[in-house]
Amino acid sequence: MLELRLDEFLEEIAGDRLTPGGGSLAAVVTAASAGLLAKVARASRDEWGDAAGAVAQAESLRARAEPLAQVSADQYESAVVSLANVGAEAPERRDFAVGRAYARAAEPPMRIVETATDVAELAVAVAKNGEASLRADAATAAVLAAAAARAASELVAVNLTAGVVDERVDRARKLAGLAARAAEEAFAGG
């Protein structure tokens, strides 16, 4: 997926296949937000002593987010296929197999939530300390990362709809809340 040109990726998103979907898009938005932070931090080296560290963090976050676009699509497709292939198994076995597949499908969105939250929190420091003319870009990265965290947290919840309270859903929602607060702080500081 990462090897597609932007117009090809957008065609895939708009296409009639089940994937890529929201998880893949949230991962790409997270990676792009981290890349934007790296750009702002690079431009801030003259006036911000910790700019190089922010660049390194942003690049690390981008590297974490990028592969999640494909992983998210692959895991979700596997879950859908498992649902279609359970056939005549005993109900308990079928429920267990489908539950496991969807639990695996919830893992990439959880990683997206975690990474997007880290991006939003890094954006606060970049917005406060970065090149003044680019601080709005850092704040923009924060709000986009927060939106990706919120979207991915919903995907975690949807994939873990076993009827039992799952701490992963709570954790995803709390992280998305942290990302939203960080975005507000980035705009206030930038």
Image (cartoon, helix red, strand yellow):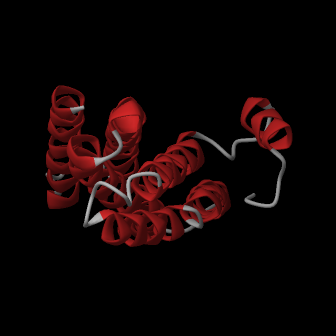
Report the front residue among 49 and 65: 49
Name the quarter where the N terminus is drawn: bottom right
Q: Classify 149 as above or below 57.
A: above
Query: What residue appears at the point 37 percent right and 29 percent down from the top-left corner?
Result: 136
Report the front residue among 114 and 168: 114
Task: State whether residue 79 appears in this view.
Answer: yes
- Residue 185 left/right relative to 1: left
- Residue 20 left/right relative to 53: right
Name the quarter where the C terminus is drawn: top left
- Residue 69 left/right relative to 33: right
Q: Position of residue 98 (x, y in %)?
A: 48, 62
Quadrant of the rendered image containing residue 141: top left
Report the front residue among 176 and 104: 176
Quadrant of the rendered image containing residue 127: top left
Q: Classify 113 as above or below 71.
A: above
Task: State whether residue 147 appears in this view.
Answer: no
Quadrant of the rendered image containing residue 93: bottom left
Q: Position of residue 63 (x, y in %)?
A: 52, 70
